[in-house]
Every structure is written in C-alpha cells, then in structure tokens.
C-alpha cells in the first residue's frame, strides 16, 4: 500500500482553541505591504500572527477590520500605526472588534498610533490584556497610546486588563488629535484609565464613561503650559495634574470638576503680555475643587493669579491643602496668591481650607493695582492666617 505524505503545516488552516472552538484562525503577516481587509470568519479567534511576529507594523498601508473580528496578539507584541498608515476598526454593539492577548492578564504591549491619517477609527472595539511594557517614545506602559502627529476617532471603546495606563493621548498635534468617546469604558487597569497632555482634555467626550478596578482612579494630565483656550467640564473622575498648570490662554472650569496637584505643583494664571481670563464656576451642589493629591496642608503649591482681567472669578469653589510654594518674593505661602503683577479676582461662595501657611495672600510687589472682591468667603485651618495683605500702601 502506498504511504500518503503529510500535508505541509503551512498549507493547513490554524484552528483556534479559544471561544467555542468553532472558528478557523487565519495567519496574518507582521508587516503588510499593501492595503488589507479582514472579514469576520465566525465565532472565536479569527486571526493570529505568524510565529515570531513581535510587531504588527502598519507603515503607510490601510488595514480594515470588519465587524465581529477577533485578533489574538502574540505575547510581547506591539501594534504600530505609522507614517500615514491606518487601522480602521468599526464594529457594532452586536459584533464588536476584539484585539486580545492569549490570557486575561497583560500579555502584549499594546497599540501605538503616530499616524495623522483620519481613517484611524475605532468604534465598538475591545482592547484586552495589553500594557506589558513601555513602547517606543512612551514612558509608561499603555494599552493604547496616541502620540506625535497621531489622530484617532474612538467611540464605544473598551480597554480591559491593562498592565499600565488604559488610554494615553500624548500627541503634539495640538490642533487635531481626534475625538475620544462617548462610551469609553475601562476595567481592570493597573494605573490611570486615561493619561493625556492637558491641551487635549477637550477631545474627550465623557458621556457613558465607565471605570472600575483601576489602580489610580484619576485622569492623569500634564502640560508645559496651556496655550489654547479651554473649558474643562464633565470629567467623571478627579483630574490629577502631574505638573504645574500654567495658563497662557483663557480657561474655564465648570461645576463638579475636581483638579488635584502633586507636591510642589501649582495652578498659575499668568498675564504674559495679555490679560488671560480664568473662571472657576461651580454650584452649591457641585463645587469646583482645587486641592492636593494628598489631603494634608502643603500638599501642593496653590493657586497664583497674576492677570488683571476683570472677568477672573471663582464661584462655589473650594481650595484646600495648598501653601507649599511661594509665588511672590515675600516668604508667605498660601492656598491662593493674588498679585505680584497687576491682578484682579472676584470670589463668591468660596472656601479656603487647610493651608500650610496663609489662606489668601495679596501682594503688589511690582504693581500698584491688586484687587480682590469677595462675597461669602469662609476659612478653616489655615496655619498662617486667613487673609494676609502684603500690598504696599
């Protein structure tokens, strides 16, 4: 009897053992040389990568994942969307697109997007088990990071089981980084659900935001200085500033927003040749809160107002735990410093609590006009006094 030769392994489909075991997973290449469309192949895992594939490199090519597709990443693998490449993954509520690791613990690096291509769209996408280590030009592990000139439009995006951050928006494309939300959902995230350059805060849509089992239940933000007009509103978690927040633009913070600062950092309202306006407008039921990361006096530098805009105002605001940094040449530190430059600020229904030194300092060291207008300001626990007036007569 003639013996049958075995069929070469590479000619056989790879059968996935995940899901209900009914799907046949196709092997896809690490670095596609032309545009690709990947359809749903059925239940379970649809696509896996060739052995030894450490990076799915989408360099100037367009890849489309159709509704219902599940791609399993190799352990340690990263996805790079580069140089006008695009990854278009538009699923549905019934047929989401899943990019997953080999287990429900972090097994792969995640997705980094530095392509400005506006075909980068994620809708009804699940990114699971990423964030094992930092990716190139990213200083924190993250399941999904947009940086450089990167653009992404993401809605109904779920990130789960990340070993680092969930979503990081670090793009230096200050004008057009895309949009994020509604429907951002984060589960089992080791660090922050979202980390971003503060310039991009308004790219986030907080509608239907969900976050559970996160190691750092805040939105982490940083900036060299805020240089475009901004309104911060609706953040469902406190915003943790990991740097000073210097305002070189008009800035408005709306009801219910809480901003926390790390030790030594401050909120700085500059004039910088123009009278930039800062407005903090809470309500009795949803005040604006400005405080330190830690609940102790001197936990952060406090607020400095050096702008004389007549629209500078705080209504239903609570400032606490400050007084860690001097903002004038005088030695007094405070929760709130008004002056040094020509300055104006109106306070109504404001609480000034638990400063390591003064509650409020007024100082006209290099200007004559420093004005504070106040109505119903209350003080508590300010070690160096509630209101210290250092203005020269």
Image (spheres, grey):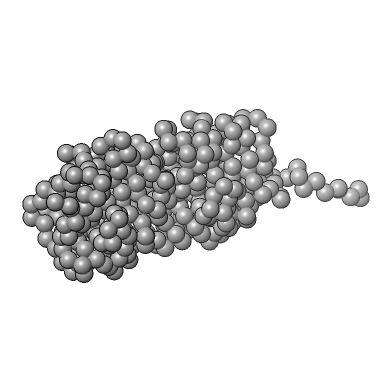
Q: Classify 83 as above or below 45.
A: above
x 21%, y 40%: residue: 308
| In the depicted structure, whether residue 44 falls above or below residue 324 | above
Does 168 sit left or right of 84 as displayed?
A: left
Q: Farthest residue to the left: give it.
A: 375
Q: Is residue 158 visible?
A: no
Q: Is residue 151 left or right of residue 236?
A: right
Residue 269 sits in which quadrant? top left
Q: Nearer the viewer, residue 265 or 168?
A: 265
Q: Is residue 392 visible to us here?
A: yes
- Measured as percent of width and height from the top left, residue 265 is found at 36, 56
- Point out residue 99 in the picture as x, y percentages from the top left corner: 53, 47
Pick whichever, 300 or 280, lies toward us: 300
Is residue 56 shown left or right of residue 2? left
Q: Nearer the viewer, residue 174 or 269?
A: 269
Give the residue at x 54% y 44%: 112
């Amino acid at each position: 009897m003639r013996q049958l030769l075995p069929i070469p392994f590479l000619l056989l489909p790879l059968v996935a053992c995940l899901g209900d075991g009914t799907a046949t997973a196709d092997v896809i290449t690490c670095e596609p040389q032309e545009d690709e469309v990947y359809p749903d192949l059925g239940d379970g895992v649809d696509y896996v990568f060739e052995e030894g594939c450490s990076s799915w490199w989408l360099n100037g090519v367009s890849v489309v994942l159709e509704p219902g597709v599940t791609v399993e990443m190799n352990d340690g693998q990263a996805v790079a969307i580069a140089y006008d490449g695009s990854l278009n993954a538009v699923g549905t509520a019934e047929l989401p697109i899943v990019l997953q690791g080999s287990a429900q613990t972090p097994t792969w690096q995640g997705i980094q997007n530095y392509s400005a291509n506006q075909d980068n769209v994620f809708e009804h996408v699940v990114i699971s088990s990423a964030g094992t280590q930092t990716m190139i030009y990213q200083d924190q592990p993250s399941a999904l990071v947009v940086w450089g000139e990167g653009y992404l439009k993401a809605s109904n995006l779920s990130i789960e089981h990340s070993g680092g951050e969930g979503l990081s928006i670090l793009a230096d494309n200050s004008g057009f980084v895309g949009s994020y939300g509604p429907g951002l959902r984060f589960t089992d995230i080791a660090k922050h659900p979202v980390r971003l350059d503060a310039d991009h805060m308004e790219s986030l849509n907080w509608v239907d935001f969900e976050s559970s089992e996160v190691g750092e239940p805040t939105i982490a933000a940083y900036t060299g200085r805020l240089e475009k007009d901004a309104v911060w509103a609706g953040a469902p978690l406190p915003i943790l500033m990991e740097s000073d927040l210097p305002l070189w633009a008009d800035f408005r913070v709306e009801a219910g927003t809480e901003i926390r600062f790390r030790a030594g950092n401050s909120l700085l309202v500059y004039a910088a040749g123009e009278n930039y306006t800062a407005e903090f407008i809470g309500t009795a039921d949803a005040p604006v809160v400005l405080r330190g990361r830690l609940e102790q006096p001197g936990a952060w530098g406090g607020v400095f107002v050096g702008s004389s805009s007549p629209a500078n105002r705080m209504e239903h605001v609570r400032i606490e735990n400050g007084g860690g940094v001097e903002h004038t040449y005088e030695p007094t530190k405070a929760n709130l410093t008004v002056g040094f430059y020509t300055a104006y600020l109106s306070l109504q229904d404001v609480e000034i609590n638990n400063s390591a030194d003064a509650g409020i300092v007024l100082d006209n060291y290099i200007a004559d006009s420093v004005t504070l207008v106040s109505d119903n300001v209350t003080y508590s626990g300010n070690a160096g006094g509630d209101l210290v007036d250092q203005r020269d007569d």
